Image (cartoon, coloured by chain):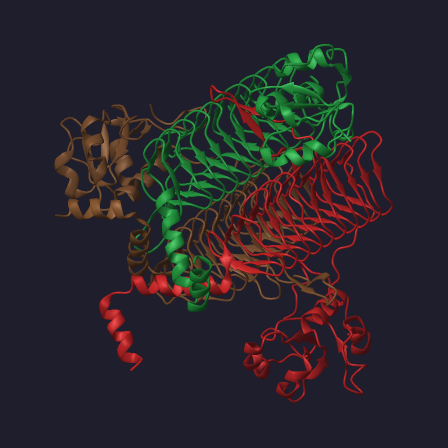
Chain colours: A brown, B green, C red
Amino acid sequence: MAADSRFHAVAGPLPLARIAQAGEVTVPEGAGDRLFRGVATLQAAGPEEISFLDARRWLPGLKESRAGAVVIAPENLHAVPDGMIPLVSPMPVLAFARIAALLHPPPAPDGTRHPTAVVGEGALIGEGCEIGPYAVVEDGAVLGPRCIVGPYAHIGRNVVFGAECRILSHVTVTHCIAGDRVTLNPGCRIGSEGFGFATTPRGEHVTVPQLGRVILGDGVEVGANACIDRGSGNDTVLGPGTRLDNLVMLGHNVRTGRGNVIVAQAGIAGSTALGDYVVVAAQVGINGHVTIGDKVRIGAQAGVMSDVPAGMEVVGTPAIPVREAMRSFAAMRKLGQSKAAKAAQEKTSD
Amino acid sequence: MAADSRFHAVAGPLPLARIAQAGEVTVPEGAGDRLFRGVATLQAAGPEEISFLDARRWLPGLKESRAGAVVIAPENLHAVPDGMIPLVSPMPVLAFARIAALLHPPPAPDGTRHPTAVVGEGALIGEGCEIGPYAVVEDGAVLGPRCIVGPYAHIGRNVVFGAECRILSHVTVTHCIAGDRVTLNPGCRIGSEGFGFATTPRGEHVTVPQLGRVILGDGVEVGANACIDRGSGNDTVLGPGTRLDNLVMLGHNVRTGRGNVIVAQAGIAGSTALGDYVVVAAQVGINGHVTIGDKVRIGAQAGVMSDVPAGMEVVGTPAIPVREAMRSFAAMRKLGQSKAAKAAQEKTSD
Amino acid sequence: MAADSRFHAVAGPLPLARIAQAGEVTVPEGAGDRLFRGVATLQAAGPEEISFLDARRWLPGLKESRAGAVVIAPENLHAVPDGMIPLVSPMPVLAFARIAALLHPPPAPDGTRHPTAVVGEGALIGEGCEIGPYAVVEDGAVLGPRCIVGPYAHIGRNVVFGAECRILSHVTVTHCIAGDRVTLNPGCRIGSEGFGFATTPRGEHVTVPQLGRVILGDGVEVGANACIDRGSGNDTVLGPGTRLDNLVMLGHNVRTGRGNVIVAQAGIAGSTALGDYVVVAAQVGINGHVTIGDKVRIGAQAGVMSDVPAGMEVVGTPAIPVREAMRSFAAMRKLGQSKAAKAAQEKTSD
């Protein structure tokens, strides 16, 4: 079974030659006219569907698969069973992503505005936008062409979006300037008041007005229920192509470079700056006012307390270079083993 | 004082015999006609209220309580003060839960549809459903009988719910097939796009279309602002009776067995499979593509990096068996103590 | 550039004498008539703007700044460049907060009710309140004077708010009694059902009805997408002036004292009690049923498993006093270093 057509569009059947063009894959001679309806996993795919092989551990699954064709790296070509068409690509996942998007295109804006949508004075809605039921677009907001605004999306006063953005259901976005092709998943909060206050000698917390903005570069994607506070004075800035997963939290004035990947439930405290192509794994915490270099990789649940130089991989709390951490952990675990366990281990290693 | 009647229904007063039947508790002879109005904690209960004793550490509270009756295990019966009626049960919390639900019944659907609700073409609303203000039920969605749909609940195209579900305020649910008696607490996001992409050699992230669904078994409950992404190709599946607390995150293709308990702010990465009756404590992180056996217990904040066999209890990051971890921690803590502290300890242990 | 006037009000220009009065700062003689338009960071401020110096590490920025005036502590007065007006305060951030609020006042309620707002029977809306589009205020709810209710805010039956509260977009609040000047940021969930259930011998989880409330003291602020469950029998209580950051989770029956600060993504399990002025850093987890004393400070990502006496600072998982933890960590890290690294270190220390 391919994708459930109740929930996902099916553009096919399409000829393999057309599909191969989208995925930039090589098709065996004579197979270009075969028709395919969709994509599916190796387990689920049938003769009219295309699957893909990513990791080598899936090789057994390939053998058992009934898929009509498979996107595959040249080095795994030998494992393709008889009768299955190999679609060769040096980057199978990327090729598969493009093929899947051709066969199951994402919803396009339908150009309609639901009668219940509230659009404020002076708001500019670009050509071809789709505005869902109960959306609120406040005065002066600007939407570029072909945006999708979901149900209950709340776009604040003077907020700006470029072309082809998706602002999905229940999103709140205020104090924000966003580029093209920005996706805000359901329930994320962009531009909320940062957590800034001064405390009086009597213990009363007095809000420091949060007077900055949120700047979202082209192609930025923000996960469901994630939160990005606006800057306190400077701006909070997400570089082009940066992707945040669900429930991520970015404090005021955080800046990321290009193409950062910040996985679920990670949090970055105020005024921290990340370089380009940084990867922050799930549930990581990064202290405020630190600098993370280009292409740094931070392991899941790590706690980063200070600057990390470009290219380094760190793990643990406080975060340290990954090799060092692995040795520490092994040593620590040894400390915790009982004498009996140690004796058993020694025996095994005889 | 019992439950605040501004916020909680009061069905009583009811005779103790009727109450005892609901809770499957034993009532002393002659007490069956006594009337009770509600339930309350030991501290708060008065003569017309029923309380319960769970843990032994609350025994002092029992002595001071003014409760008219108390649900109690047989082994604690001796501690019930004079004049308080003991309601004996081998499982006092379970019995109390049932008594409380009788005396303070949860809101039932009132069978009305608010005039502001938007219900799409071909959507089927079961008998006796209550649809709140500004709910959006898209084309082709199906609700079984006696569901409650709260304000601003967004039920996507072709989504299916069984009987007696509660989809509370501000929920987003798309690409989902749900059983009976499913509860979605406020603001949870079901069926959002998973965090799947391939990266080009130039560092551009290209979305891999997320073509699966979310399948929720009978009796599943999802906490406020929790997120469950839809499958990427396979489905994300929650087994019957599984309960998720607030702000939990489940990635695409996660599968749980029956009756899992996943506590607040825990996160499970993509394609991980959990057995039956697994308990995942608060703020735990579980790696992607791992297998967790039946009845595994994972301690709070643990980081699980690999498979865990059935029945095991693990803690820590990386997670290891609990006994081993306790010894490691003690050893590590010792390393951190000053010489003076060690000397002091040695003296104490003389 | 000062605050972007598309997003932030500008009350100025105002004379420095008036500004100094608001901030309780000292102005040099003769400068009281100078006009200022706004506030900005040291880097961004121009001659018509006021900035501030907080930490000493910003002293180089002060030298380069073009700000017309700077709020500064007396001990840093010497570093103010020629031509910049020093505004002296013993608490520069606090003074700056008050000046910024004068020059860029937060949005005030405009006294209007949007025609799409649904207000239930017997609900009382105080004088001067602003009720946004698609707000739902259920039967019997009470709002004090001058509250702001944002788009899609859902205020449940019989909920009570005092004066000058802000219930922002997409908030859900039920089973709650709140004081004056309470702020609920977008998407937070107040009063949801707590995670309470009993499990039958067959493994079925049976909900224990959650019959308490949430009590919010004067001046409480709750972050975006944070969750506070209502009490199970007792109440969940936040003391006056307590502030929660985004994505924080408080379980049923949690109680905080005055002025607590609970940073992003921290979670506190059920029935735990915090004293006054406790600081809980980001991503901390606190076990249920523990007691945290006054002025305790808990470091980021710590896991608190048992009571912490007043005044103590703890870190780590399980949390231990900070000094002890630092020594443990150093010792553990040493275990993880390679022999070569140790030799190198020894050489360096020769």
Q: Quadrant of residue C96?
A: bottom right
Q: Is residue B28 left or right of residue A43?
A: right
Q: Quarter-wise, where is residue B10 in the image?
A: top right
Rendered position, A116 above or below C349: above
Residue B136 in the image: x percent, y percent?
Answer: 62, 29
Q: Is residue B197 visible?
A: no
- Position of the N terminus of chain A, as image quadrant, is top left
Q: Nearer the viewer, residue C218 or A267?
A: C218
Q: In this view of the protein, can residue B131 be seen by the observer?
A: yes
The total of numbered circles placed on residues is: 0
Residue C241 position within the rendered picture, expressed as x and y whole percent measured from the top left: 72, 55
Q: Is residue C245 above or below residue A290?
A: above
Residue drawn at point x = 29 percent, y = 79 percent: C348
Q: Position of residue A279 (x, y in %)?
A: 39, 55
In-front residue for pair C19/C314: C314
A309 relative to A215, above or below:
below
Residue C83 in which image quadrant: bottom right
Q: Nearer the viewer, residue B263 or C140?
A: B263
Outermost residue toward the front in this view: B350
Left or right of B160 on screen, residue A153: right
Q: Is residue A330 left or right of residue B58?
A: left
In this image, A91 relative to B215: left or right? left
Q: Position of residue C271 (x, y in %)?
A: 62, 41
Which residue reaches farthest right? C127
